[in-house]
């Protein structure tokens, strides 16, 4: 009985180590979304915005609504990319360790 528990603890430690490695790798990835030359957003795989560029040619009160819409669209797009990449990496991890999908775990 204790042998199975020891093996389970070893697997849990390996999973924790792999999760940390995946999270670090995601932090180092860069995902981008642009709307032509108007807005450019860069986010890492940990869903942190690391760069934002607004073309100064479009910075005027007349373009406020357009810039807001484009910025929202780019942020949503790059957030979706980041979530998909994270889910894919964690899904591979659960497959590698033969774990069932555990909602909310990752």
Image (cartoon, rainbow, N blue to C red):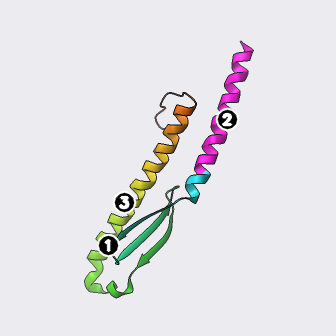
* Residue contact between numbered discs 2 and 3, judged by CB atoms under 8 Å: no
Q: Is residue 81 above or below residue 16?
A: below
Prevailing SS of the magenta stretch: helix
Please check the rendered image and state whether residue 91 is part of the magenta-colored stretch, yes or no: no
- Image check: 90 left or right of 33? right
Q: Which residue is mark 3?
A: 77
Q: Where residue 2 appears, x then y in whole percent? A: 74, 15
Q: Nearer the viewer's eye, disc 2 or disc 1?
A: 2
Q: Which residues are magenta?
A: 1-23
Crowd rating for badge 1 (residues with CA inside 10 Å; few <14, some 14–19, many 20+): few
Q: Is residue 106 visible?
A: no
Alpha-carbon span between mark 2 and mark 1 = 44 Å
Q: Earlier in the sequence, mark 3 or mark 1?
A: 1
Work out whether 1 lies above or below 75.
above
Q: Residue at horizontal 32%, vertical 72%?
A: 68
- CA distance separating discs 3 and 1: 14 Å
- In the image, taking residue 72 as reference, residue 106 lies left or right, namely right
Q: Secondary structure at mark 3?
A: helix
2 or 3: tag closer to the N-terminus? 2
> Label 1's element?
helix
Identify the residue under disc 2: 14
Q: Nearer the viewer, residue 9 or 93?
A: 93
Do callouts 3 and 1 mark residues in contact (Cβ within 8 Å)? no
Which residue is at a point 54% across and 27% down the rendered structure image? 98
Q: Residue at x 67, y 24 (%)?
A: 8
Other-residue count near label 2 (Cα within 10 Å), few / some / many at <14 / 14–19 / ≥20 = few
Q: Secondary structure at mark 2?
A: helix
Q: Quadrant of residue 82?
A: bottom left
How many angstroms separate mark 2 from mark 3 (CA)? Answer: 33 Å
Q: Which residue is mark 1?
A: 68
> Which residue is most to the top?
1
Q: Where does the image place residue 88, in percent across and percent down from the top left?
A: 47, 44
């Amino acid at each position: 009985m204790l042998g199975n528990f020891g093996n389970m603890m070893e697997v849990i430690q390996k999973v924790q180590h792999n999760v940390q490695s995946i999270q670090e790798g995601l932090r180092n990835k860069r995902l981008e979304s642009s709307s032509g030359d108007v807005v450019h957003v860069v986010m890492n795989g940990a869903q942190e915005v690391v760069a934002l560029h607004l073309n100064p040619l479009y910075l005027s009160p007349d373009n406020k609504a357009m810039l807001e819409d484009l910025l929202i669209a780019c942020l949503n797009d790059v957030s979706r990319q980041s979530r998909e990449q994270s889910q894919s990496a964690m899904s591979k991890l659960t497959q590698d360790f033969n774990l069932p999908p555990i909602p909310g775990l990752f």
